[in-house]
Image: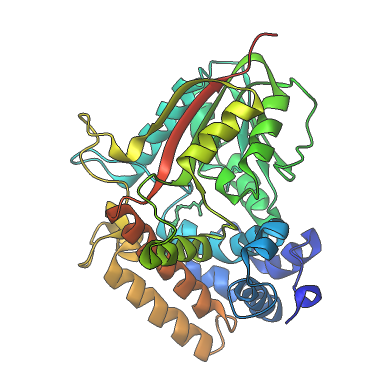
Amino acid sequence: MSKNQLLEPTPELSKALHANVVSDQSASSLVNRLRGKNKDLQTKSVDTYQQFWKNSENNNEKSRTNMYKTLTNTYYNLATDFYEYGWGESFHFARKSIGETLRESIRRHEHILFSSARIAPGMKVLDVGCGVGGPARECIRFTGAHVTGLNNNDYQIQRANIYAAKHKQENYSTFVKGDFMDMPFEDNSFDAVYAIEATCHAPVLKGVYSQMYRVLKPGGYFAIYEWCLTDKYDDNNELHRKLALDIEHGDGIAKLFSTQVALQAAKDAGFEIEVATDLAHETTIGNEIPWYADLDVGMINFNGLQGFARSQVGRIFTTNAVKLLEKVGIAPAGTYQVQEVLATAADSLVGGAKKEIFTPMYLIVGRKPMN
Ligand SMILES: CC(C)=CCC[C@@H](C)[C@H]1CC[C@H]2C3=C(CC[C@]12C)[C@@]1(C)CC[C@H](O)C[C@@H]1CC3
């Protein structure tokens, strides 16, 4: 497949691909979701995604960054159902304390960011790269603000709207389709802006941070959790390079940047930096368990279906189950490759974390100057 044979993830494609999924709110199980997909479009979407990583003209960093929208959008067309099945509604990591569930730790991690951004009742807040809206819904509950979720993936926006209705939050949230490198909002229109593990999909960090700066009101706060390579990453080390590439492949990322690049990009965008720190190394009380622990469970995890799905044994089970579903024609051909891509994600994230060359929680808090 060459560049012009890539299947563009347009709104029409999303509608046709997930036609029988989004209209059915009860289709919560992965099997139902996979059964509801348009088989041909799912297979072609998998092919499109894999072209960016196979030996083809698209397999280089330049093509991936040039075509970041196709890359990331196609990834989320394929991965979203698996994410909800194995992780929940908030697509990000968190450090945990002893006895804390994943969901509790995820909420606490969100609260830290909302507080850092000084979000208060009645504020107009922007969530950049909002996924299916898990953090936005929690922000509304926690702060009483109005949250606009920006997302370039039609399927995730549809899911976010379904959840907003379910939680009776329609008057407190709006989900807008758009590219975070060219946001469809007026200058100075939000009281606070935040992004949780989303801006790593940008081809250039300064581009997305500058957009966040532009739409933020003077004096407003910007708070992000960024996915970054750390100072320990060595580009001359083959294993480091492989782990970074596997994280990119497994997570729909065109190119990972370092913490230094991220911090400089936030400064260059114009923010006065108040905090820049890697929370992966936070050792304070309440953060005893590392962020990758839930993906590093070797044994069967009996903590519900999601707990099982996240464990290594659960991942092997899901891989084989999807393979079987594909064989008997319930899941579209290629779906099993999606599960394999996600398994690569899990292994490389854990590998990168253990080598301390990667963090998903480089916290940057900045302020747009008053004038
Ligand atoms: C991609 C970005 C920027 C953020 C997403 C972070 C995480 C929420 C995902 C990264 C790897 C994902 C995997 C799963 C859920 C969501 C992630 C942790 C699964 C556990 C979903 C169920 C599958 O069977 C296995 C997946 C492994 C990877």
In the rendered image, is residue 309 in sight?
A: yes
Up-down relation of residue 224 to residue 31 (above or below): above
Residue 137 at least partly seen: no
Q: Is residue 200 above or below residue 371?
A: below
Pick whichever, 214 or 125, lies toward us.
Answer: 214
Q: Nearer the viewer, residue 323 or 158?
A: 323
Which residue is situated farthest in the front direction here? 236
Q: Position of residue 351 (x, y in %)?
A: 32, 61
Q: Residue furthest bottom?
A: 327
Q: Which of the four quarters of the rendered structure image does ligand 1 lie in?
A: bottom left
Residue 224 at x, y = what percent?
51, 33
Measuring from the top left, give residue 17's x and y in whole percent.
Answer: 70, 69
Q: Quadrant of the C terminus?
A: top right
Q: Is residue 221 left or right of residue 289?
A: right
Q: Is residue 248 left or right of residue 268?
A: left
Residue in the picture at 46% in, 84% down? 323
Task: Please indicate whether residue 33 sits to the left or right of residue 149 in the image.
Answer: left
Q: Which sits in the foreground, 134 or 127?
A: 127
Residue 124 location, x and y as percent?
Answer: 65, 21
Position of residue 108 in the picture relative to residue 219 (left or right): left
Question: How did the renderer colour the structure?
Answer: rainbow
Q: How many marks are shown on the rendered structure?
A: 0
Q: Give the vertical position of 117 relative to 2 (above or below).
A: above
The quarter of the displayed image where residue 283 is located: top left
Quadrant in which the N terminus appears:
bottom right
